Image: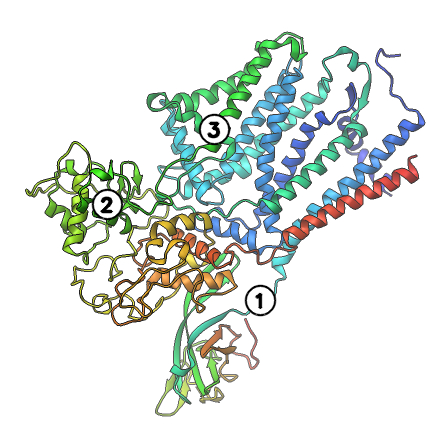
Amino acid sequence: MDEKTPHPDPPSEATRRGFFRVAIGILGGCIGLVLGIPLVGSLVGPAFRKKVPRWARVAPVESLPLGQPAVLSFTDQSSEGYLRETVVRNVWAVKRSADEVTVFSPICTHLGCRYDWEPNSGHFLCPCHGSLFGLDGKALAGPAPRPLDTLPVKIENGELFVEWERYELGISRKIPV
Amino acid sequence: MPDRILRWVDERFPLTAMIRGALDEEIPGGSRHAYALGSAILFVFVLQMITGVWQLFYYVPSVDHAYDSVNFLRTEVPFGWLIHSLHYWGANAMIVLVGLHIARVFIYGAYKAPRELTWLAGVVLLLVTAGLVFTGAPLPWDEPGYWAAEVGTSIAGTVPLVGNAVKRLLRGGDVMGPLALSRMFVLHVAILPAILLGFLAIHLVAFRAFGSVGPWEESKRNSTGEFWPDQAFKDTVVAVFLLLLLVFLCVYAPPPVAGPADPLDTSYIPKPEWNFLFLYETLKFLPGRLEPLGTMGIPLAGILILVLLPFLDRSPERNPLRRRFAMAGGVAWVGFIVTFTVIGYLSHPGGVGGTTGPPPSGSSASLSPSAREGSRLFGSLGCNGCHSINGKGGAVGPDLSDEPRRGHSRAWLAAQIVNPKSHNPNTIMPPYPTLGDTQLNQIVDYLSSLGAAAPPAGGASTNTPPAEEKPAPSARPAPRATVPLSVPAPPNAGLAPTNPSLPATAVHGAGPLSGSTGQGPPGPAASVIGSVEHGAKLFRLYCTSCHGPDGKGGVSNPGAEGGTIPALDPIRRKFFSRDPGEFATNIDRVLQHGAIPKGPLPEKSMLTFGTTHSLSQEEISDLEAYILSLNGVERAELKHPGIPPRTWFLVVIAVFALAVGGLVGVRALRFR
C-alpha cells in the first residue's frame, strides 16, 4: 500500500464521479451550443440574405417634361459586403402624368449598347445594330429581342426614386442579372 | 459501433492511450478550483483561435478595407457583434488569467526544480500573449489601434543601437502604413499563434511529466485526487462562468466603435489600453535620456527576473510564509504594476480635443484689448486646429508660440493670413480673404504679443519664409488644413481675395449656389462608421461656433432666411432618416460640398469640408456619427444581429439554467 491514501472507490465515490462525467458532458455540450449557433449563423446568414431594394433619389417629378423623354443622371451607392462605392448612372425617364413616370434602363436589350433619343423620328435608336424603340419602350425594329427594360420607380414627396438594376441581354425575357 | 470504430483507430493510432495519458493524473491534495486557471487560459485561447479564424471570413488586412470590413462584421453579419466582441474581451481575459496563473504558480512555488522548464515555457507564453495583444490592436485600423501601434513601434525605436532597425522591421518601412498592417496581421494570425502552440505543447507535456505540485503543507498532500473527472469538472464549471462573463461583457460593454484611423488627426490623444498603462505611466517619470530605461529597461528587467527566478530561488521551500524575500519581491512588482496602472488610468492627457477657444498665451490680462480680441478670433476661426500655441493646438501648421522671434513683419503676417500662397505657393493653409482690416489687425496684434521676451516685429519686412507645414506621415495622405466655419462666405479655400461686402453668391465661383444644400455626390465618409466620441470633440472644435453647443442652434446669421444658422439637434426633416446609412449620406453631401443658406445676403454659409480637404474623410465620418447620435440614431446600429444582444444573453442564461436544473434532476434520480 502506498503511503498516500489509495483511490477511494466506495459506491458513493463512484456515484460522485459518474455525476461529474455526466455534468462535464452536459455543460460542455451547452458551451458548444452557445458558441456553435453564432458561428454557424455568421456564415449562413449573409450567404442567404435577400436583396433589399436600394432606392436612389433621381429628380423632382415636376422638373420632368410631360410626355417627352429626359435623360437623368443620379448618384447610386452600390454595396457588396463591406465594399461601398458611389456611381453616377444615367436613365431615361418619360413622365406620363404628375404621379406616373416610366424609367428605362439606358442599356439596349440586344447587346448592351447605350441608345439615344431621336427627336426627329420620335424613337429611341441604338447606334450599334439599329434597334428602334417607341416612347413606350416597345421594340419596333432591329435585332432587340424585347422592349426596353423598365426600372422600379417610386414617387415620394414629389421626388422620383429609382432602383438600379441590370438585366440579362439578348434574350426575350427580362431576367435580373 | 463507436467501440468498433475506436478499436479500429487504436489498432492504427494510440488514441485511447493518448487520451488516458492526458486525463489520468493524480493531484496531490485533491482537485481545487484554484488549479483551474491553467485550463481557463486554455479555454480562452481556444475561444480566441475560433473567433479569430471566424473573423477572417470577413476581415481584410488592408488599410483601405480593414476598418470597414470589421464594422461590416460587427453590424451586418449575424452574430458578428458577438464574435468580434468575444475576441476583444477574450484577449483581455487572457491577460488577466495569465497574470493570475503566474501569481498562483509563484505563490505555490511551482517554478522550482524539477519544473523549471514548465515555468520557462510559461514565461514565453506570457510574452507571446503580450505580442498577440500588441499585434492585434492595429488590425481593425481604427484610431486606438493605429496609434497604439504607432506609439508602440516608436517605443521599440528608442532602444539604443538597434531600435531604429527594429522599428523599421516591425513597420516594413518608415511609417505605419499598409506594410505595417500586413506585418502585424501575419504576426498575429500565423507566426505568434504557431509559437504559442509550440510552447503550449512543451508547457503541457512538462507539466504532465511532473504533475501538479499540490499544497505546500505536507499534511495536505497525503490524500490525492484525480484530474478526470474531479478536476475536469471544476475546470468545466470555471469555463462556464468565464463564458457567461464574456458574453455579459460583449452584450453590456461592447468594444467601442472608435472611428477610422487618421494619421493626420491632431485632436486624437493616444492612450494605451489598460494592459500597457503601467509602462505608459512609467515613461512619464523617465523623460529625455532616461526614456530607454522605461521603454526597454523595466520590461527587460521584468522578463529577466521571470526567466531567472527558478535559478535564483533554488531552495526547495514552497511555503510562501517562509519565502519572505521572494514574496516581498513579488508583492512589490505586482504593487508597482497595479499602482502605475491605476495612476495611468486616472490620468488625463492634455490636448486640443474638445477645446473651442484660443490657446492660452500667458496671462490674457496682459494682452491689449485688440490682441485679446485677436486671441478670440484665433480660436473662433479655428486657427488652433492647425497651429499650436504654448503646447495647445494642432500640429499641422507651425507652432506659433514664439512667432515674434521669427522676424515676420506685421505686413508679412497680414499677407500670410489673407493669402498664404503669396509666400509659399504649395502651402495648404487656407486663405482668409474676407477678414476686415480691424479683424486682421487684431489677429496680428495677438500673434505679435506671443512669447514674453520678444517684442512684436516692427515695420521692416523680411523675406524669411514661414516654417512649412509638417509633411503628412500618412499611409493615405490627404492634404489638410483647418478651415473655420464661422467665417463669412466664401467657403472655398484657395479663392483670390474678394470684396467681403459682396453677397455670398457673387464670390463663390465654383462653390455651391445660393440656397443650395449639398450639391454633389456623397463622399467616402458616408459609408464609414465613425466614432461618436471623437465626432463630439471635432464638433466642439469646428462646428459649435455656428451650430451652437451640442448643435442646439441659435447662432445668428444675418441675411439668411430665418436669420439663424440651422440647429442640428433636431436636424431638419429632409436630412433625417431612421436608417443610419441614409441619414449619414444625407448630411455627408453637405459636409463634403458645403451649402449656402437661402436668403438675400447670408453672412455665413456652410463650408466645403470634404472637397477642399479641410477635414479628412475619417473626421467627416466621425462628425456624421455624432450628428446622428444627437438625433437619436446610432451610426453603428446592428442591422443584422442574428439575435439581438440582450435577447441572446437571456438565451445563454436560459440554456445554462436548464442544464443546471437538468443536472440537479439527474443527480437526484440517478446518482443518489
Between the C-alphas of marks 3 and 1, the distance is: 51 Å
Residue at 61% x, 28% y is B98
Task: State left or right for residue A147 relative to residue B603.
Answer: right
Q: What residue type is labelled 1?
A: Lys
Query: Foreground residue, B636 or B199?
Result: B636
Image quadrant assignment for residue B564? bottom left
Task: Give neighbour class at mark 1: few <14, some 14-19, many 20+ (Cα, 10 Å).
Answer: few
In this rendering, the label closer to the viewer, 2 or 3: 2
Q: What element carries label 1?
A: loop
Q: Is mark 3 on a helix, strand or loop?
A: helix
Task: State left or right for residue B533 relative to residue B369.
Answer: right
Between the C-alphas of marks 2 and 3, the distance is: 35 Å
Image quadrant assignment for residue B352? top left
Query: Foreground residue, B521 or B395?
Result: B395
Find residue B455 and report its horizontal and vertical position in percent: 13, 36
Q: What residue is pinned by disc 3?
A: B343
Q: Do labels 2 and 3 share a chain?
A: yes
Find residue B139 and report its horizontal and vertical position in percent: 49, 42
Task: Give neighbour class at mark 2: few <14, some 14-19, many 20+ (Cα, 10 Å).
Answer: many
Q: What residue is pinned by disc 1?
A: A51
Q: What element carries label 2?
A: helix
Q: Which amino acid does label 3 sit on?
A: Ile
Q: Residue B375 carries which label?
A: 2
